[in-house]
Image (spheres, grey):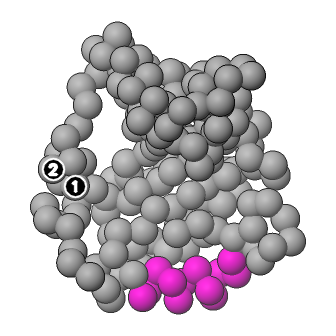
Amino acid sequence: MCIRDRDTVWPPTFTWRETELYAKTMLEKNIKPELEVYHQGQFQLVYNLIKKNLIRKPYFIQFVMGAPSGVLPTPSNLLSMLEHVPQGSIVSVIGIGPYQLPLTTIAIAMGLHIRVGLEDNIYYKRGVLAKSNAQLVERAVRIAKELNREIATPTQAREMLGIPKEPKQY
């Protein structure tokens, strides 16, 4: 679930009422929301959802750094964002565009989780388009292994997030 404000700015933002409605619907359908947080102020909405019991632990917080109108993608801002994370959260970091590789590396070194892929960055390196999502994932895996971080299996990831071991059939 992204906190959005209808097509006016990026990232777009939903109203609190809309976000509460979406969270309630996901809770009723046993869907784990991904809470994309673009800047520190959005934690107010996260805490509102917790206070109203509209999301369950572990909360899945996804920092989106480097997006227009979002927090600047610096190590100090990453640390600042972490100060606001509610207990019982799993934190993942996304770096947009040229920030994907440095933020991925920093997040892995800090023990955080990451998301990489063409949705956030189309380049493998400056001036060179990535061939596929797999190419970006393979690089992230190499970095994680160099930093002695284990890669979760799909089953382990599902367990960490508190979701069923088997995907739902639709």
Q: Quick check: marks 2 and 1 in contact, CB under 8 Å?
A: yes
Q: Position of residue 21 (x, y in %)?
A: 53, 89
Q: Farthest residue toward the right? A: 8
Looking at the rendered structure, the kind of residue marked 2 is: Thr
Give the CA separation, mark 2 to mark 1: 5 Å
Q: Is residue 164 left or right of residue 78?
A: left
Helix, strand or loop for disc 2: helix
Q: Is residue 39 left or right of residue 138?
A: right
User: Are there few (<14), some (14-19), or many (20+) residues within 10 Å of tag 1?
Assistant: some
Q: Position of residue 131 (x, y in %)?
A: 54, 33
On screen, residue 153 above or below 125? below
Which quadrant holds residue 71?
top right
The label on residue 155 is 2
Looking at the rendered structure, the kind of residue marked 1 is: Arg
Q: Is residue 96 left or right of residue 134?
A: right
Q: Which residue is mark 1?
A: 158
Q: Residue at x 23, y 37 (%)?
A: 152
Quarter in which the C terminus is drawn:
bottom left
Whether residue 133 is visible = yes
Camera-side residue: 82 or 155? 155
Q: Is residue 94 left or right of residue 169?
A: right
Residue range in magenta is: 14-25
